Image (cartoon, grey):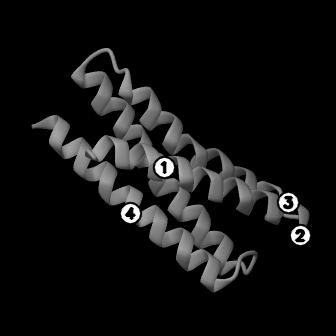
Amino acid sequence: MNRENVLREKSYAFALRIIKAYKYLAKEQNEYVLSKQLLCAGTAIGALVREAEYAQSKADFVSKMSIALKEANETEYWIMLLRDSEYISLPISKSLLEDCSELLRLLISSVKTAKQ
């Protein structure tokens, strides 16, 4: 399986986890502002990876993957903020951060490879 397929599958699975986290935060914690930011950034990663699959050019591919990388970095920020404000537990935040870090590494690698 190539890197893009792994990235496609992992970003989709991560988006599903983010949606579940958003639902929990809204329903159980009555937290709507930070959780909405998490939802937008966390689901955008996979959407951008999918867009990049049909990029019009190499430059378009790099652009979309670079934006996905920025969204992953932003998602990491929101997870850390939700953890440190005690809206999500340490074990949940640790698991989400590990998945997010893996996506960051895959995206960095994809961008670097595409630029070469």
| Residue drawn at point x = 46 percent, y = 32 percent | 50
What is the x, y in percent for residue 72?
47, 53
- Of callouts 2 and 4, the N-terminal one: 2
Tell me the amino acid under the disc marked 4.
Glu
What is the x, y in percent for residue 11?
48, 49
Q: Is residue 24 left or right of residue 13?
A: right
Nearer to us: label 4 or label 3: 4
Q: CA distance from mark 1 to mark 3?
A: 22 Å
Residue 26, which numbered label?
A: 3
**Residue corresponding to mark 1:** 11
* Residue 110 seen by the camera: yes
Nearer to us: label 1 or label 3: 1
**Residue corresponding to mark 2:** 28
- Of callouts 1 and 3, the N-terminal one: 1
Nearer to us: label 1 or label 2: 1
**Element on which disc 1 rests:** helix
* Residue 38 seen by the camera: no
Q: CA distance from mark 1 to mark 4?
A: 10 Å
Tell me the amino acid under the disc marked 2.
Glu
Tell me the amino acid under the disc marked 1.
Ser
- Of callouts 4 and 3, the N-terminal one: 3
What is the x, y in percent for residue 27?
90, 62
> In which image quadrant can residue 63 be found?
top left
**Residue corresponding to mark 4:** 102
| Residue drawn at point x = 65 percent, y = 45 percent | 40
Tell me the amino acid under the disc marked 3.
Ala
Q: Residues within 10 Å of mark 1 (few under 14, many from 20)?
A: many
Q: Is residue 65 left or right of residue 91?
A: left
Q: CA distance from mark 2 to mark 4?
A: 28 Å
**Element on which disc 3 rests:** helix
- Of callouts 1 and 2, the N-terminal one: 1
| Residue drawn at point x = 53 percent, y = 35 percent | 47
